[in-house]
Amino acid sequence: MSIRDVRKPISTQEFIKVLTEAAEKECKARSLLKGKPTKPTVSGTAKILNIHRDTLYSWLREFNVDFNEIANSIFTKILSETTKARDKHVYLIGEALIGEGNEVAHVDLLIGDKTGPVGEAFAAGLSNLSMGHTPLLAVIRPNLPPKPHTLLVPKVTVKTLEDANKIFGPAQAAVAKAVADAVEEEIIPKDKVDDWVIVCSVFVHPQASDYRKIYHYNYGATKLALKRALAKYPSLEKVFYDKDRAKHPIMGFKVPRLWRPPYVQISLDIPQFERTKKIISQIPRSDRIILEAGTPLIKRYGTKVISDLRDVARDIFFVADLKTLDVGKVEVDLAYEETADGVIAAGLAPVETLNAFIHEAKRLGIYAMIDMLNVERPVEKLKMLKDFPDVIILHRGIDQETGKTIGLELITELRQAFKDKRFLIAVAGGIVPETAREALEKGADIIVVGRYITQSKDIERAVRDFLELTPTMRKDIDLFRVHVE
């Protein structure tokens, strides 16, 4: 291979200038080819300079210049320029689920500038076909697409001609008509129809059969998704309000979170599985109930008892009272695998164990609860931890129950000591309605009750003795909540 002779730079400054210019050209060319910012290479830069790469390597050594340093600097610059350019473009996201049965429609969409990332996605989708998920332009009828031009992408693999007819028929027409109507109704600005494009991902169930419903639901879902995209829905306030309250309709069960104290935590300490199931079946339905798989129950049956009890406690918040003293991470994992929503460690455990325990619980998305039974200085112990637990339990043990006081003064002390932390306080140990009322008045969030309920002849009445303690406790299900999207 013959290489045309190129004049060698006479100084380090000249070499760095020539090298940087060439490397930047190569970086832009590679980035354009790859579709994303890409670092320049020695070989590519040598081609821009029209010299052999070995020659460039020799110059780098002679002038003592680090190519990687220059390449990283150029890459950072190009990346920054690309990010700024992208930020100038409209990039909006919308989603909607409408309908029921096999014809239910779920639409995810992007809407934005042709010259921005949405336009890039539009072009890539139209030019990179995938078997069973072939993108197609939405059309109101053959030869009449809406504006902005819309790319429809099937979510579910199209396997048969019947599947294809649903996509190329009612779904395609529904999406196109929704886009056209959105422009007419000024949901989409009319002056943007030639500047924007839409990428619309559509779900059509393989067993869907009613074409009118497929059209009807996909039209509604597309139009709602467009409204949400242009309104930048949802707001953070909406997300924060619903994240611990919502129930996914297809999932089939609710994942409870402790968002609205106070709660009654029922300690299931009796080490008899069938009797425990019978107790649970008699507990009145309430979103203020927490169930605790007590230590004796877990010691007899293992953490698997939680999964087994889900047959009669499907949507209830379940805590595993492990009283962990060692191997914090391992014990959290054991409870998590059996669907526990929260886990309890002993506050007497070493700080290292509690740190591992809390870290693992938060990593897995379940509540870390620390039981302060026999901990002489709870505040000092908590200050030693890297992460803060979700729940602190002020606990008097069964063998210590000689009076009614349970250290309620600690509630105020904890609140004052950790004003910057978000946590709940539970009280436990021989709790009866009288001590529960006092604890609630002093600011407790969770009342942990055992024998008063589990050994009662009328379990439902015993539970209601606590659920009816205060006006707040009596407000059970969120009856006045209106689901407006």
Image (cartoon, rainbow, N blue to C red):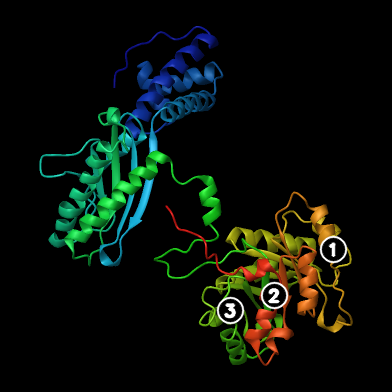
Q: Indicate the quadrant containing the N terminus: top left, top right, bottom left or bottom right.
A: top left
Q: Is 167 in front, or is 449?
A: 449
Whether tag 1 and tag 3 are in contact, CB under 8 A, the answer is no
What residue sits right under mark 1 in the picture?
Answer: 410
Q: What residue do we see at 69% from left, 61% from top?
A: 390
Position of 240 with respect to 421 (left or right) is left
Residue 322: which numbered mark, if any?
Answer: 2
Q: Residue 425 in the image: state x and y as whole percent.
A: 74, 64
Helix, strand or loop at disc 1? helix
User: Is 142 placed above or below 446 here?
Assistant: above
Neighbor class of circle 1 (other Cα within 10 Å; few <14, some 14-19, many 20+) is: some
Q: Residue 395 in the image: state x and y as whole percent.
A: 80, 73
Of mark 2 and mark 1, the one earlier in the sequence is 2
Q: Amino acid at mark 2?
A: Leu
Q: What residue do we see at 50% from left, 20% from top?
A: 60
Q: What residue do we see at 30% from left, 65% from top?
A: 100
